[in-house]
Amino acid sequence: MVELFDTHIHLDRLPPEQLAAELARARTLGITSFLVPGVTPAGWDGLNLLAEEHAGLFLAPGVHPLAAESWSDKVQERLLCLLEHPAVIAVGEIGLDNKIPVPMVRQEITFRAQLRIAVAAGLPLLLHCRGALPRCLQIFQEEQGPGVGGILHAFSGSGEMANVALDLNLTLGFAGNITWPEARRAPEVLRTLPATAFVLETDAPDQSPEPHRRERNRPLWLSLIARRCAELRHCSLEEVAAQTTENARRILHLT
Ligand SMILES: [Zn+2]
């Protein structure tokens, strides 16, 4: 039986009445662990409740670049308190996104503040870096992020950027985009990475894999991403599952 770890899934954005059944379906395919990232401070309490209701859930509370302008001393205090919750194993998803209308200055302030909190707490990070990867990695390094490491979520950068990230103690997260026929870089990078360098994620309800591109993404479809990964790397699904689950547990300090 394979065991898979979804390292980035927004379970709080799935219909709540379907959640138990959706997770049960996923579990029948061996998907037993789910890391749920924070997005806005308003959503944090909901994440705690989810982790208390469902088995196999871990949390990475934090402020997404989209909500960067909500950062304040009070929010910082709340985040520090949240880190005490037993399901919290990382801080996320944090980073920079230059495709959204949030001023980069505010994004950088919020990103740096949370990097410092994670580093002080010894917690790994879930990074969201869209259209600003070099700057993201530069700040990550300046704030001592490599000391705690983390996952670079939804990686679609070049092989060169992959190497820079790996040298900074980051693991690359691959999502549904590796199944998309038009995707070039991500599948190519994944094909040649060392077995210890990557993890898998659905990013549900976003980034649905083939053949479900037009539908809302679901937890059980991590199995489609894992299957495509096995195809790309010419190995078995069992090997992919064992490697990526071991990688997730290592980078998230669960072993
Ligand atoms: Zn996300």
Image (cartoon, rainbow, N blue to C red):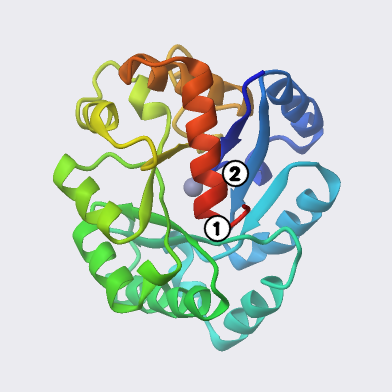
Check mark 2 vs ligand 1: CB closer than 8 Å? yes or no: yes
Q: Are marks 1 and 2 in contact (CB under 8 Å)?
A: yes
Q: Can the viewer see residue 150 in this picture?
A: yes
Please state if 56 lies on the left or on the right of 109 as rendered: right
Which of disc 2 and disc 1 is earlier in sequence? Answer: 2
**Res. 10 mark:** 2
* In this view, 52 is above or below 178: below
Q: Position of residue 8 (x, y in %)?
A: 53, 44
- Residue at which label 1 appears: 39
Q: Position of residue 107 (x, y in %)?
A: 36, 70
Which residue is painted at 73% across and 58% down in the image? 87
Check mark 1 vs ligand 1: CB closer than 8 Å? yes or no: yes
Tell me the CA gap for discs 1 and 2. 9 Å
For label 2, the crowd category at 10 Å Cα-Cα, with few meaning under 14, some 14 to 19 and many 20 or more, is many
**Res. 217 mark:** none
Q: Quadrant of residue 179?
A: top left
Task: Identify residue type, mark 2.
Answer: His
Which residue is painted at 27% across and 63% down in the image? 137
Specify the farthest residue to the bottom.
73
Figure disc tally: 2
Residue 191 or 19: which is nearer the viewer?
191
Secondary structure beneath label 2: loop
Please state if 189 lies on the left or on the right of 172 as rendered: left
Q: Quadrant of the N terminus?
A: top right
Specify the farthest residue to the left.
160
Which residue is painted at 48% across and 65% down in the image? 67
Residue 24 or 46: which is nearer the viewer?
24
Secondary structure beneath label 1: loop
* In this view, 154 is above or below 83: above
